[in-house]
Image (cartoon, coloured by chain):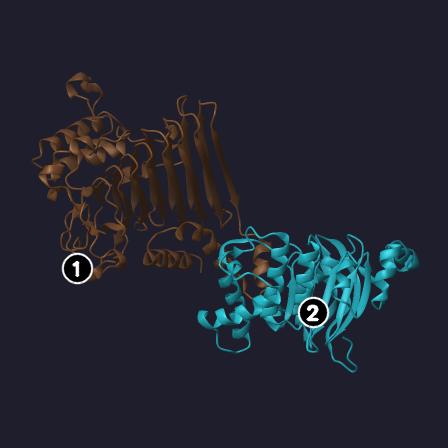
Amino acid sequence: MIIENSEIVLSIRDLKAEVDGTPILKGVNLDIRHGEIHAIMGPNGSGKSTLSKVLAGHPTYDVTGGEVIFQGQNLLEMEPEQRARAGVFLAFQYPFEIPGVSNLDFLRVAYNSKRKAQGLEEVDAFDFDELIEEKLEVVKMDPAFLSRSVNEGFSGGEKKRNEILQMALLEPKVAILDETDSGLDIDALKIVASGVNQLANPENATIMITHYQRLLNYIVPDYIHVMARGRILTSGGKELALELENKGYDWVLEQFAEVVA
Amino acid sequence: MSLDVSPSSISSALMDRDAFLTGLVETINAASTVSDKAFLKEVRQSAVNWVRHTTLPTTRDEEWRFTDISSLKQHQFTLGKRVELSISEITTLPETDGARLVFVNGLYSSQLSSVGNLSDGVVVTSLENLSDNLSDRLPQYLAQAEGNQEVFTALNTAGLTDAAVIWVSKNVVIENPIHILFINTEAQSPNIYQQRCLVVAESGSQVSLIEEFRNHLNTETKETKVYFSNAVTEIWVEENAQVNHVRVAREGDEAFHVGKTAVTQARYSRYSCNAITFGGKFSRHNLEIFQIGEQTETTLNGLTMIKDNQLADTHSALFLNHPYGNSRQLQKCIIDDKAHAVFNGKVFVPKQAQLTDAGQLNRNLLLSSKARIDTKPQLEIIADNVKCAHGATVSQLEDDEIFYLQSRGIDETAARHLLINAFAAEIINQLPIDSLKQSLTEFVSAQNV
C-alpha cells in the first residue's frame, strides 16, 4: 500500500555489479518506502536475479559502484547474515536442500540468530514449537514438514512455501521474492501469494521479481519496474503489467534504446 | 574352514621371510597364556604357522595399493599388559548398563563389565567364562569365518587368549543393545593389543550390539602414544536371524588400528552395520560379508571423519553367492587437512546369485585442498538377472549452500558446522543409542571449530 509521507526503507543508488569481470548491473536506482509492494519485471538476463542476490550479499557478485542504504545503514558493508538479522530477506528462486538438518532445527537456529543479534534471549525448543505452529498457518503447511530435512525431497511448491514460512518467522523489513511464482501450479501459487499478502503491512516492504504477470493477479503491486540490460528502464503503476503482457518487453527496449546502448 | 597348514608340508625356506612379522607373532604367542582348551591351542598353532609363511602387505598388493602400512615396522611392539581401571575412568553408555562387556588392552575386565541385566537366552561373557556346553560348539564358529587366511586376522588368532562372546539362542529377541567396549591404554612403549569378538545369533533370534574401540589416556601424562590395535570380530547370523551392529573406532592420535569384521549370513537373515571411524593415525577396517543362503538382507553404513595426517581405509567385500540377496551400502567420509581416506567396496555376484539387488554409494566431503580420497567400487557380476548400482561423489562445502544459511541470519562458521554435522548426521542418526549419538555428534562439532 502507498502511504503518504512514508519513510524510505531501502534506497538503491546507481548500483553497479559484475560477476567474473562481466558487468551485470549498470546503475540501478530504486527507492522503496514502508508499506509498499514493488514488482520488478523484465526479460531473461536483465539482471533481476542479480539485483536480488547483490542485495542479500551473495559472494559471487562484486559491487563496482553505487550504494544501498537500508534503514540508514550502508547495506553493502554488511555480511549476508548481518543483513538478514537486520531485516533483509531473500526468498530464493531455487531454495537449497540441506539433507540431515531438520527443517525445525534450521528454523529455530535462524530465528535465534536474529534474536541474539537484537540482544534478546534465545527461544527454547518448547516455546519455538508454539511459535512455529502459528506460522505454519500462513502457508497452510503440514507440520510433518518440520521434521523433514530442509527442502529435501520437497516439490517445487513445497520449497516455495517453505521460503514464505521462513519469511513469516523472520518478519523482515524488506522481503525480496525472487521468481517465487516460477514452477508453481495455480493452487500452490494462491497459497504462496496469500502468505505474502498476510505478511505485508505498513511497517515492511516487498519486492517481487518475476517474469510473469500471473503473480501480480494475486499479489497486487503498488509499483512496477521494468528492468533490462542491467537498468530499470521504466516504472509505473499496476496497469503497466497489462501493457507488458500484451506487448512484451520489446517496446520498452525500443523506447529506451539510447539508454541501454 | 580351518587353517590347515602343517609346517612340515612347506619348505622351511619359505618361513619367517618377514622378520618384523615373525617378531610380532613370537611376542604375542610367547607372552599370552594359552588356554587349556585343545581346540584353541589348535587354531592358534595353525594361525602361528600361517603367519610365519606370509609377509606384511605392501602398496604393491592390490588390497593395500593406497594404504601404506610400512610405518608399522618402525616400532617394536610388546604385548600389552593388564591395566586396572576404575569405572569412573571410562565412558560407558548408560542405556547399556547391565549389558556391557569391557576389555582393557584386549583382556577381559570383570570389574568394569556389567552383565546383570540380560534376558534369558542370551549369553554375554568372555571366552574364559563360557559354559562347557557352548565351548563345545566353538569349533563350528571361532576362527572359522571365510577369509581368515589374511595376515592381520591370522595374527590375531595366533595370540587368541580371550574374546568377547555374545550368544543368542534360537528365536530369542533381545531388545536392548549390548555394549562391547575395548579400551586401549596409552603406554610409554609401543604395545600391541589384540581384541577378539564372537557373535552367534541362532536361527530366528535378534540382537543389537555396539562394539567400541577407544583409547584411554594416561591420567597423569595425558599423552598419546603409539600402539597397535588388531581386532577381529566374527558374526554368525543364522537362518532368519537379525544382527544390528554398530562399530565405533576412536583410537588414540598415534595409534594403528586394523580391524576385521567377518559376517556369515545364512538364508533369510538380516545384518546391518554402522561403522564409525574417527581416531587413529592409521586405521583399516576390513568388512567382509559371506552369504551362505538365499534372500539375505545386508545394510552397510559407514562414516569416517579424519584430519591432520590421519589415514583411514575401509575395505568392504560382499560375497553374494545365492539368489535374492539384497544389499545397501552408504559410506561417507569427511576429510580435512592432509588426511587421506580410502574406500574400496567389492561386491561379488557369481552366476548362481540371480535376482540380487545390490546398491552402493560413497560420498566424500573434502574440507581442505590437501585432503585426499581414493575411492574404488569393485563390482564383479557374472549373474545376468541382477540389479547392481554404485556411485561415488566428492564434494566441498558449496558457497551457495553456505550463502543460503547466511541469508537466514546464520554466520559462516555456524553454517559450515551445520552442513558438516548434517553430512555426518545421516549415519549417526541411525544409531540405536541416544547417548552414543550425542557423543559422536559432539565429536563432529568439535572437529570443525
Callout 2: SS: helix
**Pointer 2: residues within 10 angstroms few (<14), some, or many (20+)?**
some
Give the left or right position of residue B58, taking residue A147 as reference: left
Callout 1: SS: loop
Image coords of residue B187 (percent x, y): 21, 51
Judge whether B425 appears above or below A241 on screen: above
Nearer to us in this view, A100 or B418: A100
Q: Which chain is the one coloured brown?
A: B
Residue A233 visible in the picture: no
Determine the residue located farthest toward the bottom in the rendered image: A5
Badge number at residue A197: 2
Q: Which chain is the one coloured cyan?
A: A
Give the left or right position of residue B105, taking residue A141 as reference: left
Placement of the N terminus of chain B among the 4 image quadrants? top left
Nearer to us in this view, B134 or B220: B134
Question: Of tags 2 and 1, which is closer to the observer?
Answer: 2
What is the distance, in whole Å, between disc 2 and disc 1 at their CAs?
A: 65 Å
Judge whether B10 appears above or below A235 on screen: above
Image coords of residue A24 (percent x, y): 76, 56
Badge number at residue B86: 1
Q: The disc labelled 2 sits on which kind of residue? A: Asn
